[in-house]
Image: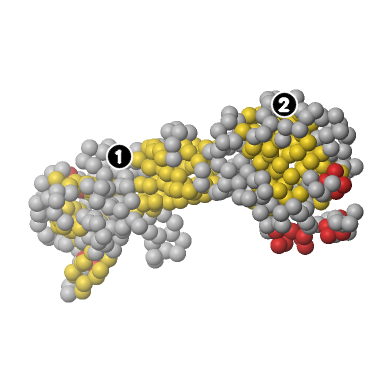
Amino acid sequence: MQSKFYLTLVLITLLTFIIIPGCGGNNNSINPISSINTPTPAIYTPEGNVGYLTINIVWPQAGKKGKCSILSENDEKDLTASMPVDTTLIKIKVRDPNETNPDNTIDPNGTCTIIRDGRSTITEELGPLPVIKVIVRAEAYDSSSAATPISINEQELKIKPGNASDNTVNLDLGEYKLTLNSDPDIIYPDFISGGDSTITATLKIEYTPDPNDPNSTPTPRPIPNKTIDFSVLSGKGFFSETNDITANGTTDPNGECKVTLTWDKTDEELNDIQIQAEFKPDPNSSPSTKTCNVSLPCSLVWKDDFEGYTPSSWPVPLWISDGNASSDRSTNRIEIFPYEGSQSLRLHGRVTSMWGALAHHFMMANPSSYEIRLKMYNNNDSPLQGHHFRGRVAISSGPSWSNSTTTLLKCYESGALGGYGISGSYSILNWYSIRIQYLKSSAGTAKINYLVKQEPDGTPIETSSPISVINYPYLTLESGGGTTYFDDIQIYDLSANPNNKINSSEWIEENIPPGEIVQELYDPDK
């Protein structure tokens, strides 16, 4: 947490000014512009007196807040305010209220520079000054060579003789405020084209509102030329500037520092990404940190690794058998032939005729954008005299081969892959990881992405192609001829629709279309 510190004109971290008529000057730690001890003759002073500003500064120290004490006529007041923790130099300037240039002070005694020299507290006097209305200005710098202050505050004061407590001015020099945001704050996980978000850290000095003015809204001051460090705390992403999970940059004149976050397309977990920005104003102070999130609008709708079914059975009630999967249960069933775990789903289409084996599973209602993940293994049955393809992944309007169907990926007997714009080949007797994304845009168009990879370390086939808008709600797996094994099925909703996030115990109750009862779709006696 960032510590708060205080500057005061009349004690610690706040600038408090006491007008003491007739006091002499003391210049131990102040670098005065001039040591003239009388007001400029050209300035009219109706009261005919002079006054002094007593300046008491307690420099920021790690873990300690500032405090200002004013002793006047046996009446002590404690006043506090803030100062940036890396302040090393303060300039005090006193000018006429009608003067717009802060460097044109009322006379040579109206300005001084106080340098941080190792002492924790410095007390000095500024004056003599004429007894008139003035503007008192304080400027905080983070180095003696800095041309521009990091913080400025000024207030009007009527210098007059009398009770010093009547002439107190508190100048809050503020504290650093770091903010962080992402634009956009959502990345759609397109594993072909990826996705970017601009991460903007903004550094400003913020000032405390006047407690006596409920409408007081001090304007923050942007801070340029400060280093901001960025890091990815969780999720899979990196900064394009460094191609790494860390980066840094420098704030611009608006106090902003921008980096580009890129989603890691190899991320299969699709978790939100959390980013941190850190600003450390001083080596001895605690850093100021802020975090923000970039969301991936996706949720796991359902998955099936076929581990919970009885071996040699059909995975009822969620999977609906069709074609040869219903005709021949001896070759279409749960088998001990997994990609991982102990079981998978075996489908066997007839080799000698066009009677494939199909398994249908309700995917989601009104699908918009989604991702299908699965593992597939094709056996070496040949020659195929009916359908000349082995494994197939499709979406269907209903749980039957007679319903409208769109093929997403097909493994031909020749070894070629078929689908929308995909080209390449596969090998029999090997497990393949398959990811298929269907992405619908706000403009009403759609595209399909493929990532097909032979396990464990084959070269991925990645491609993308336009596709017609199709809202079929069923996933269909098929073996056109011979044996194909399927495992580790996962369906992700990529449209940020919370209604599609379910678990297996809710599936039958919430997602079966009205009028259809899954238990009646499979009769073991047929």
Q: Do the CB atoms of the residues marked 1 and 2 lie less than 8 Å apart?
A: no
Q: Position of residue 332 (x, y in %)?
A: 79, 46
Q: Is residue 265 left or right of residue 355?
A: left
Would you place residue 510 above or below residue 99 in this image? below
- State the residue at coordinates (14%, 51%): 118
- State the residue at coordinates (61%, 50%): 341
**Element type where label 2 sits in the image:** loop
Q: Nearer the viewer, residue 479 or 500?
A: 479
Q: Position of residue 506 (x, y in %)?
A: 72, 62
**Element type where label 1 sits in the image:** loop
Q: Nearer the viewer, residue 362 or 30?
A: 362
Closer to the chain start, of discs 1 and 2, is 1
Residue 75 in view of the camera? yes
Q: Amino acid at mark 1?
A: Thr
Locate the N terminus by quadrant. bottom left
Q: Position of residue 97 (x, y in %)?
A: 32, 50
Q: Is residue 418 left or right of residue 356?
A: left
Q: Residues within 10 Å of mark 2 (few under 14, many from 20)?
A: some
Locate the C terminus by quadrant. bottom right
Instruction: Residue 142: name its quadrant.
Output: top left
Q: Is residue 239 left or right of residue 77?
A: right
Q: Position of residue 141 (x, y in %)?
A: 26, 45
Q: Is residue 309 left or right of residue 149?
A: right
**Real-space Cα separation, disc 1 to disc 2, in angstroms:** 70 Å
Residue 148 is labelled as: 1
Q: Amino acid at mark 2?
A: Gly
Residue 415 is labelled as: 2
Q: Residues within 10 Å of mark 1 (few under 14, many from 20)?
A: some
